[in-house]
Image: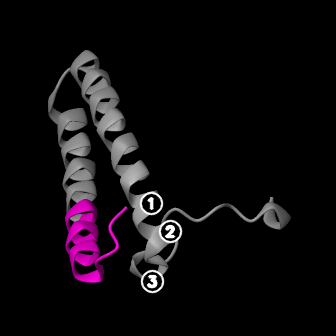
Amino acid sequence: MISDLAVAERVNNLLLEILQKFSESVVDVHAKCSPEESIAYRKAVGAVLGQMYLISRDLYALHPDLRPPGLLESPNPSTG
């Protein structure tokens, strides 16, 4: 998707920052809003994160060293 390493690093940092901010916002909405609002917000955030996953997957396929440990790893079937 993005072959230039410097650009890939910037995109990766942005994706990780957005992931953190969305995670924090889901907790905040859950704590301060109605259950209905919280569910609707989580669904909307989930849709956005799904698209971010696709970007990350393609980015890490080209630049595996950018992937933080444990992120987007397949579970080990022998542990399960």
Eye-nearest disc, 3 or 1: 1
Range of magenta residues: 1-16
Q: Amino acid at mark 1?
A: Asp
Instruction: Give the SS element for disc 3.
Output: helix
Q: What secondary structure prevails in the magenta region? A: helix
Residue at 52% across / 62% down in the picture?
72
Q: Which residue is mark 3?
A: 65
Residue furthest top as drawn: 36
Which of these two is toward me, 52 or 5?
A: 5
Residue located 43% across and 77% down the image: 63
Identity of the residue furthest to the right in this view: 78
**Does the magenta portion include 31?**
no
Q: Are marks 2 and 1 in contact (CB under 8 Å)?
A: yes
Q: Residue at x 28, y 69 (%)?
A: 12
Tell me residue 54's x, y (percent): 42, 49
Q: Which residue is mark 1?
A: 58
Mark 2 residue type: Ala
- On the image, numbered disc 2 is attached to which residue? 61
* Helix, strand or loop for disc 2: helix
Specify the amino acid type for callout 3: Asp
